[in-house]
Structure formats: structure tokens, C-alpha cells
Image (cartoon, grey):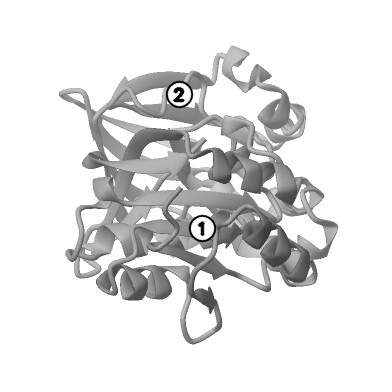
Amino acid sequence: MDNKKWVIIYNPAAGGGLSGKKWAKIKRYLALKKITGPIYKTSIHKNAGDLSAEVIKKGHTRIVCIGGDGTVHNLINGVYSQSTINPESLFIGVVPVGTGNDWARHYGLSRDYKKAVDVIARGNTKSQDIGIMTVIGKENQKVYFMNYAGVGFDGYVISKIEKYKFLGALSYLVAAVFNFLSYSNFGLSISYNNKTEKTSAFLLGVGLCKYTGGGMRLANKPVPDDGLLDITIAENFSKLDVIKHIPRLFNGNLFKSKKVSTSKTTDILVNIIEGNNFAQADGELVYGDSFNFKISDKQFCFFK
């Protein structure tokens, strides 16, 4: 494989510093597989999104991303915010070394860095849809996501997650268990599929892939390349409902509840009428009172 256009972006802080600890070994194995090129390290001043936009302007079309869901999310936002090269002409390879690695989990990409690099080296590619979350009224800020976005409880958990990250993949579950008592349902107005409804919701999820939050299954039957968003609405949860459903967030049984409904759409408008304004996209916290979610007409191409 021609490696002239390879570039490597890695986040040393991903996975609670696991990425930085493994970096020397990962770098050697990439070189062994002839995946070499300029190396860029993320920092508090430049995240993977800033760096991806920068390297694309230099002509790189094959990017290796070493990090977790947040790193890949930032990188994708850089890819789709730039106008130098059509995003569909770019190919991303992911070595998952984050806390949750939920997008990688959906595709069966290994946490073993050698197996992940082997996938990139084989050169087989796949593409999927990209979601666009627009924060209405906040200069119509656009946030791109490749896995899952949500309004409500999962956003609230993300707002509390930092102090639990030392627990690795368990951090999401622990944060959910320890913080559900301080969380309340919120009032929503939702417009999609030519209808508008109001409800009191525990969460509203917008999924492209199956997993989020370290293995939570909040999207019922998502198909990442069908051109549709997988919508989950959990309504009118009591504290007892929350206790009963926390295990179901992880085992897929959430969708058996009569208080949980699912649907498919290309576009959904969500207005928060009362209560929490926590939202998240691929595990990155977003604040706002009104959100529009839709499918992009651009595809995300990656090595699989």
C-alpha cells in the first residue's frame, strides 16, 4: 500500500493515559506494517479535529487515529468541517485505546493494538453514515457524530464522568449508578416523521451504531449505512424505573419496556421545554435547549 499520504494522529491522554503508555509499541508496529508518515500529538491547544483539518490541507488522505471515542469524534469533526478535500476521499484507520471504544466495539475492532493495526494494513475499507447535530440558537453550531448522540440521562452521565474515568470501561456504569438520584425527567417537544409530540423523557437517543457509554445499548436496531437515524425515547421514568432499567441499559432489554419507544427517521427536531439541557455526541458533552439531528449526505470511510 502506498504510504506517501499516511499521517498519524494520536492522543496520549486517551484511556486515562493508556494511549501514551502504549505509544512506543504502537509506533514500532505501525512501522513494521509500513504505515509511516508525519506524527501529530493532540494537546489542550490542538485536538484531533484541529490536527485533521491541518493535515488534510497538506494533502494527506489516509489518517491513522490512535485514541478513544472522543479522539475519533474530534477527528471526524475536523474532517467534515474542512473544505479542502471531499470527506469521501479520505480514509481513517482507528487504533482504539480509549475508555469506552464504543464505535470500535460495534465493528468488532480489537483493543489489541496489533490486531487493530493489522486491519488498517490489510487496506479493506467500509463506509457509514454521519450524523449532524445542530445546536439551534447557538450560532447554529454543528456537531458531527459517527456513533450515537443523545439528550437527557446519557448527557447527564457524561457531565459527571471525569472523576470516574480511572475505572476504565466501568466508569460509565458507576457514574450512572451514583448519579441517577439527582437526575429528573425533562419536558420535550419532538418533531419528526411529519408529527410533533410533547413528552416527559428520561432520555432521547439518536443512534447510528449500537453501543454508547462503555457498552450501553441505547439504539435498538441501528444500521450505520441505511441513511436513517435510530431514535429511542424513554418516557416518564420513576426512580424505581431507573433502578430497574440500569442493567437493561447494557444488556439490550431496555427496548422491552412499555415506556421505551423506537423509530427511524432522517431528521428530528428536539426542543427542551423544562428541565435538564444536557446532550452528548459520541461521548462529548454539548449544552443547548434546542437540537436538530439529521443524516449527512457525506459518508465516513474507514479501514475495516
Label located before the other in sequence (1 or 2): 1
The residue at the point 71 percent across, 30 percent down is 250
For marks 1 and 2, give the CA distance. 26 Å
Q: Secondary structure at mark 1?
A: strand
Q: Nearer the viewer, residue 197 or 160?
A: 160
For label 1, the crowd category at 10 Å Cα-Cα, with few meaning under 14, some 14 to 19 and many 20 or more, is: many
Residue ID for mark 2: 222
Residue type marked 1: Val
Q: Please state the horizontal and vertical placement of residue 79, each as a whole percent of the image.
A: 32, 60
For label 2, the crowd category at 10 Å Cα-Cα, with few meaning under 14, some 14 to 19 and many 20 or more, is: many
The residue at the point 20 percent across, 53 percent down is 86
Residue 224 occupies quadrant: top left
Q: Nearer the viewer, residue 10 or 154?
A: 10
Residue ID for mark 1: 64
Residue type marked 2: Pro
- Left or right of residue 239, residue 211 in this image: left
Q: Residue furthest bottom?
A: 45
Q: Secondary structure at mark 2?
A: loop
Q: Please state the horizontal and vertical placement of residue 186, each as a whole percent of the image.
A: 47, 46
Q: Residue furthest right?
A: 167
Q: Please state the horizontal and vertical placement of residue 231, each as a whole percent of the image.
A: 40, 28
Q: Please state the horizontal and vertical placement of residue 150, each as a whole percent of the image.
A: 46, 44
Q: Is residue 93 visible?
A: yes
